[in-house]
Image: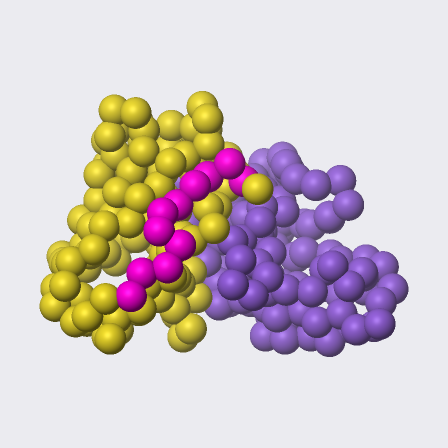
Amino acid sequence: QQPVQSPQAVILREGEDAVINCSSSKALYSVHWYRQKHGEAPIFLMILLKGGEQKGHDKISASFNEKKQQSSLYLTASQLSYSGTYFCGTDATSSNTGKLIFGQGTTLQVKP
Amino acid sequence: DSGVTQTPKHLITATGQRVTLRCSPRSGDLSVYWYQQSLDQGLQFLIQYYNGEERAKGNILERFSAQQFPDLHSELNLSSLELGDSALYFCASSSAGTSLNEQFFGPGTRLTVL
């Protein structure tokens, strides 16, 4: 089942902060975050694993609440380059595959 | 540049036709994934291969098929094309075949069916 992302869209000024949420109705084993600029390939940002391990970029922070089946991506002191669509991808099967179900995306626009 | 290559970049064809999309994974990656992205559907997982074997399947249509070859490159075959198949098709690769590893996406193939 597709995870639900919120908000659908957000507009920021440079330097402002934003939080993007990803919620699932199923227990999650991992959550991936990607950013995609229009017409380009999604770029890996972060993986959060059941049990607390995280892998990703130093400048990106995120959390994973296993009990709530929810992950949040924190964008602080936003820059123009942060603009794009953010997708979370979830694995709710633990079937030893890489199959991810992606949310519908959150569009972030950072203005000068 | 993720290191994943896809050809062609653009493909325009007619309904009823068949096309083949090609993907070469990053050096050393054993797993390949195919995704479809259309305006109203977001990123839809189609299929995953790991070291030549099918590992996972999504809602891939019967008109679509894929394979991964011994040199690890992969091809996605789309047949009896319909207008609704117009989309951006991404290939991604990862070192292992589980969701514990990040996926690196190629630049995509934009398919237009007229």
Instruction: Give me the residue at 59% from left, 74% from top.
Output: A8
Q: Depth check: B8 or A88 in front?
A: B8
Could you tell me residue B108's position as x and y percent? 42, 53
Q: Depth check: B70 or A48 in front?
A: B70
Instruction: Give me the residue at 15% from left, 58% from top.
Output: B18
> Which quarter of the rendering shows the N terminus of chain A?
bottom left
| Residue A99 visible here | no
Q: Depth check: B55 or A38 in front?
A: A38
Could you tell me residue A30's position as x and y percent? 51, 44
Could you tell me residue A56's position as x and y percent? 66, 39
Quarter location, residue B81: bottom left
* A54 to B65, vertically: above or below: above
* The color chain A is rendered in: purple
Left or right of A51 on screen, residue A60: right
Residue B11 belongs to the span the image colors magenta: yes
| Residue B8 visible here | yes
Quarter location, residue B93: top left
* B27 to A88, vertically: above or below: above
Residue B50 belongs to the span the image colors magenta: no
Could you tell me residue B62's position as x and y percent? 13, 57
Q: Depth check: B23 or A62 in front?
A: B23
* B107 to A15, vertically: above or below: above
Left or right of A12 on screen, residue B59: left
Chain for colour yellow: B
Residue range corresponding to the magenta coloring: B2-12
Instruction: Give me the residue at 30% from left, 25% from top.
Output: B71
Instruction: Give me the residue at 72% from left, 60% from top.
Output: A82
Left or right of B36 on screen, residue A6: right
